[in-house]
Amino acid sequence: MFTRIGLAVSRHPVVVLAVWALLLTVMTGLAFQGLGAGGLFERLASAEATTPDTDSHVVYSMTRTDGEGGESITVVVSGVDVAGDPASAAAAASAVRGELAGLDGVASVTDAFTMPDPTSQQARALLSADGDGFVELVELDEGLDDRASQTANDRVAETARDACLDALRAHDAGADAHAVSATLISDSITGLVEKDLVRGESVSLPVALVLLVIVFGGLLAAGLPLIGAIVSILVGMGALWCLTFVLDINSFTLNVISIIGLALSIDYGLLLVSRYREEMAARLAGAEPPRGAVMGGLVRQVVVRTVATAGRTVSFSALTIACSIAGLFVMRSPVLRTIAAGAVVVTLLAVTCTLTLVPAVITLLGRRLVRPSALSRVPGVRRVLAAVGDSSSDDGVFSRLSRRVVAHPWAVMVVIVALLALMATPVGSLRVRSNFTEYMPANSSVRTGYDIVQDDYPALATPTISIVAQTDTTGAAGLVSDIRAMDDVTHVTAAPLPGHEDMTLISVLMDVDDPVGQQAVDAVDRIRAMTADHPFWVGGAAAQQTDFINAMLDRAPWSALIIVVAVLVLLFCMT
């Protein structure tokens, strides 16, 4: 099979390049433009990742408000003396309210100063517990589509950052304003992923190029693995865009495919190019490369031989990796399954590029890949290339290293095992965390606003723990009382669950530094162990993390079995 692939590619290299160019153009366009449906970064999901068929998933599903009224945006105002100068604070709130109410897509703006009774519990909930700020609750028009809702969110955030801030500082020079919503939080996380991806590739690609130049001794040969890497990543991003229509693709999947695509493409491309150069060197046996049709025929023969040998090796490697990653498909968490889907896709793309695109470029370059590079004429560089290059002599660094390894196998094994054991010691203190709010960019406006709400507005803060009880508020009183008696619990509220008759939502705030830390996890376990006359489900960030870990441990043996069987079968077939 691999010989036939080599023959087809070497005979029609231009056709292969044209097909890849077309695929690259289409997939890149889909990933970054989206044909009116939004690009990949716009379609990635950054919300809380729950595990189906768990308590926390039940709570998450029942408390979601998607499609019920317009989306809510909280504009957090700080640095205003509400307690000491309420009249000035009311004037500042009126100015902010006026700026926000006139925006397109905004249905209503509510604050403590517009309520009939400013001393009511509802009004006090909108004032900072420290008396140094207030919030404006902005509700968007009902029925907005995704694009209109995104535009409205951006408009409110921009107004809060500019116009509202100017109006506030006319009353108090130290005032500040931040807009917070589910959409804005998701945007901040996705934007960070996008920036990190660009920053990471801008560092890793040049470093990889330098190392490949050292290995191959020239830019042409070094560039081939990088071409495969770039094409694999971009086409993989287009494939992910397609998957977003049938799956919720988490934003972190993009980082996974970029890492795997870069690593495997360079690894496989390096092996293929190195094999080609070795085979060509053996065919020439030190003679000057021929010219014209003779050289073209020789190049095609060597390309066929290269694909038949190195191509087989990289294909088995890719299949082994893909099957191993496929072990994640048995996990219950959708996040793990989508990561597995993206990783399998980019792995197969990397090996396909290596088997077709790279040999096609080699065929077209011909004798240029075997000519001495200009770098070899630089003083000192020739010696380095001869020592560590892919076609180095028997006196090279790696040749000498391999001879010593063969001469002292047991000593080398002991040293390597000891080093691996030392490197693995941090696993003992490994703690799996699942708190999406931590991924908001530090010091960003939305993160600052979110932290202020959590610290100063208990009634608006995201609860540490949420419980849904299948009873009314009177029937849930006993459970609420037991929870209030727990250590570190600072605030507990019970209210009817909107949209669900005879259901009560219990919100628990705890005085903990880490909402998914051990204190919160222990509290989840204690609440779940409580007895009541009615069913109840425990959710929230700590509960989601606990359920995720338990579900992962439950399916881990099956995942490990798939990996072991796949590796043994594939390696048996290869060897």
Image (cartoon, helix red, strand yellow):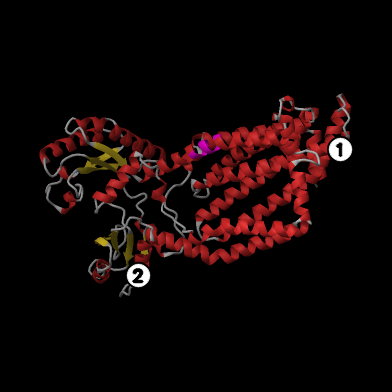
Any part of residue 141 in sight = no
The disc placed on residue 282 is 1
Q: Residue at x 71, y 30 (%)?
A: 381
Viewer-proximal residue among 196 and 209: 209
The majority secondary structure of the magenta stretch comes to helix
Instruction: Identify the image quadrant of residue 505.
Output: bottom left
Does residue 300 show up magenta in the picture?
no
The amino acid beneath tag 1 is Ala
Residue 216: give x, y in percent of width and height.
Answer: 72, 35
Viewer-proximal residue among 226 and 151: 226
Number of marks present in the image shown? 2
Any part of residue 160 in sight = yes
Residue 493: give x, y in percent of width and height.
Answer: 24, 61
Viewer-proximal residue among 399 and 457: 399
The amino acid beneath tag 2 is Arg
Label 2, label 1: how many angstroms apart (C-alpha)? Answer: 71 Å
Q: Residues within 10 Å of mark 2 (few under 14, many from 20)?
A: few
Residue 149: give x, y in percent of width and height.
Answer: 37, 40
- The mark nearer the N terminus, 2 or 1, is 1
**Chain part drawn in magenta:** 196-202
Q: Residue at x 61, y 32 (%)?
A: 25
Q: Quadrant of the C terminus?
A: bottom right
Residue assigned mark 2:
526
**In the image, is residue 406 above or below residue 211?**
below
Does residue 198 show up magenta in the picture?
yes
